Amino acid sequence: MKGDVVFQSFEVTARPEQGPPRLAALRERLVAAQIDGFIVPRADAHQGEYVAARDARLSWLTGFTGSAGFCVALRDVAGVFIDGRYRTQVKAQVADVFTPVPWPETSMAAWLREQLPQGGRVGFDPWLHTVDQIRLAETALAGSDITLVQCANLVDAIWQDQPVAPMAPAKVHPIEFAGESHESKRARLAKTLKDAGERAAILTLPDSICWLLNIRGADIERNPVVQGFAIVHDSGAVDLFAAPRKFDGLEEHLGTDVHLSPQDAFLNALAALEGPVRIDGGTAPQIIADTLGDAAHHGAELCALPKACKNDAEIAGAAAAHLRDGAAMVEMLCWLDAQPPGSVTETQVVTQLETLRRRDNGLQDISFETIAGTGPNGAIMHYRVTEETNATLEDGQLIVLDSGGQYLDGTTDITRTIAIGTPPREAQEAFTRVLAGMIAMSRLRWPCGLAGAHIEAIGRMPLWLAGQDFDHGLGHGVGAYLSVHEGPQRLSRMSHVPLEPGMILSNEPGYYREGAFGIRLENLLVVQEAPALPGGDAHRPMLDWRTLAFAPIDRRLILADMLDPAARAWLNDYHAQVATKIGPRVTQAAKEWLNIATAPI
């Protein structure tokens, strides 16, 4: 147990009323810079999904705290571009001086063409936008007399109390959990570069650098990463650009082939490289391509696929972490069932779950802000409870509980939807469809070479047959004591990266009825080679899933007659495994509750 203070905070981090004066100050900067607009992305210079407080420019300016989106602030209108996950959330978070724009249905270029019919100059910070983003935008704006121009960051210019850059110390990620030395990893990637005829590759993603060098850090909340940049050479040597004080005491671990320099030396080092130098247009900031010039060679991010395909030690660690995490979940669900409707709030649920997780000495942090949304709050897909939104769990409601932990041996992410009192029939019907989709994906076998885009509809079909759907992907990749969202693999209609053994992904269908309730169920799965079946094609190797997460699914929300016999058999087998694997790890009271919760349907 790590003291009485939980990781998660319930304070309000942004308020709508703060937006108008900040937008007005930004517009004064537009006039001074003689430009017509400025793009404010969610991203930082490292282009990871999560950002440190210093880089939270989008939420500081607009009040919108979602993990994806951007703002385009013009002199007379400011659009906040959000995807389907945040259409409900954005309404409560931004003032009316900002206009929510459905994205990607409406592209930035199409919106700019409409707002600036006579043309104009729109500024952007070249550190905060990738090569692909700028290329696509410029292509879409061709012929419009709208020009994207690089400029200093105008939000930084008005953000007077901007937090300082994070300086958390780095630490060694032990070989027992990493499963491979960083010397071996560097040698593997050096061969990849040589085989491609490339002299070097650029890394900007903090989790890629941490994976490669077997280090972890704490520069970003909930993500055990160190911020920095790296150049990987075809010799296996690495030039690392980060604050040197973060690496005090790690000299022996890094060795003589990893050369550490201050971060402000990065651009000069790039300019001195001889090409071809690999950059990934989807993660490299525009300024990197500008600095490399003709030396830049576009290719896949060097670490993304090797990092995604977990080795045996990483898979074993993830499995072990999920069993301990599952015990905390069962204790939590047992506790929640004992609380009468109307007696518990969302923050109490979050605090209780984290308190139970923190009994594990391997827990380093939660893997993201726990989502505990009851009633209408459950329909906000990435809901974050605050002191002001904290709701009481009332009879007839559901609560969506989406949470995870960062353990030394693995990262967990699990979602359960729980009935409070007597659930309404329409919620049971929707829940059973979501469960049917989750089971269908869990049971799937598929030919090698298929990607998430080819199979993710399996998890949506029961909802589609009822004229329903949800506005997020079916699943995302997960790191090994790294970022809870990890690419390049996804269960998404937009993902064309073939699934390979060792990849860990979430399986999380959902359903959301604005103003009423939300439903989501999530287990983490690992891709593995499927055993041959009698009568199967011997020449057609196939893959399937191994389930990592074990916690009961609320039987009170299941309408058994809506599940076909194969789905019921899967559920009963899964619950039997939960009882067997988790039962010995929990208190006697929780075990007795678990035996009832996992009884066959």
Image (cartoon, helix red, strand yellow):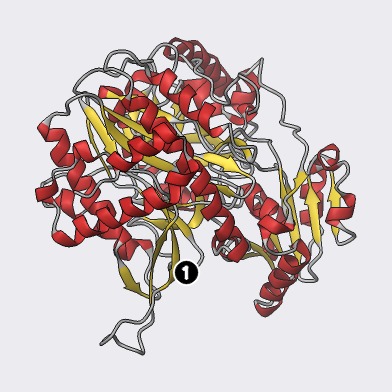
The quadrant in which residue 366 appears is top right
Asked whether 246 or 193 is in front, the reply is 246
Quarter of the image containing the N terminus?
Answer: top right
- In the rendered image, the vertical position of residue 388 relative to residue 58, given as above or below: above
* Residue toward you, 275 or 443: 443
Q: Is residue 112 left or right of residue 567?
A: right
Q: Please name the amino acid that badge 1 sits on.
A: Glu
Residue depicted at x 35% and y 82%: 532
Q: Where in the figure is residue 598, as x and y percent of width and height?
A: 29, 45
The residue lying furthest to the bottom in this view is 539
Q: Position of residue 138 (x, y in %)?
A: 47, 49
Residues 389 and 488: in front is 389
- Residue at 48% across / 12% down in the picture? 18
Does the rendering let one see residue 461?
yes
Residue with the mark numbered 1: 500
Residue drawn at the location 31% of the way across and 50% of the way down: 575
Task: Give neighbour class at mark 1: few <14, some 14-19, many 20+ (Cα, 10 Å).
Answer: many
Task: Tell whether 48 sits left or right of 234.
Answer: left
Compared with 413, 448 (above or below) is below
Q: Secondary structure at mark 1?
A: loop
Picture coordinates of residue 9, whole percent (x, y):
53, 20
Give x and y (percent) for residue 19.
47, 15
- Can I make out residue 280 in this image? no
